[in-house]
Amino acid sequence: MCAPGGGAPRNDGMASDLIIFDCDGVLIDSELIACRVSANCLSEIGMAITVEEIVERYVGISATAMFADWQPELERPCPWASLKPCGFA
């Protein structure tokens, strides 16, 4: 629900006039964060890979292509392979 005047409500009761969504990494470069998360998740399911390897091999390709590439190295089906892209490309 919007606050009076059209701004979004804040925790302090004040209204915001502007909300910035950084979906393309201009304000915060989240790609390296995503690579760290990928390396950690893959490690948890038995595929040892470094952040540097993730960057070298997968930056700039689709999640579907990454999942397909991981599959031969995993001892079980990739748990994320059935996920559908969110469409924010």
Image: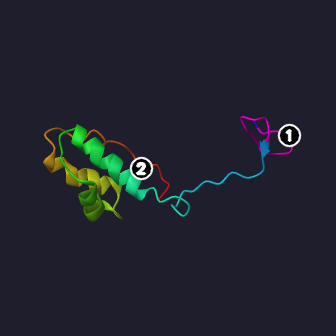
Labelled disc at residue 4: 1
Q: Is residue 75 above or below residue 66?
A: above
Give the quarter of the image for residue 56. Answer: bottom left
Q: What is the crowding at mark 1: few (fewer than 14 residues within 10 Å), some, or many (at least 20)?
A: few
Residue 4: x and y in percent read 86, 40
Classify mark 1: helix, strand or loop. Answer: loop
Q: What is the crowding at mark 2: few (fewer than 14 residues within 10 Å), some, or many (at least 20)?
A: few
Say left or right for 65 vs 85.
left
Q: In 3D space, how far apart are the residues under numbered discs 1 and 2 (Cα atoms)?
A: 36 Å
Furthest residue in direction right, as rendered: 5
Task: Tell me the residue that label 2 is attached to.
Answer: 85
Residue at (56% x, 61% y) in the render: 27
Furthest residue in direction front, as rendered: 12
Residue 50: x and y in percent read 23, 53
* Res 3 seen here: yes
**Residue 78 is one of the magenta-drawn residues:** no
Type of amino acid under label 2: Pro
Magenta highlight range: 2-14
Residue at (35% x, 46% y) in the render: 37
Say left or right for 28 vs 13.
left
Q: Is residue 11 above or below residue 39?
A: above
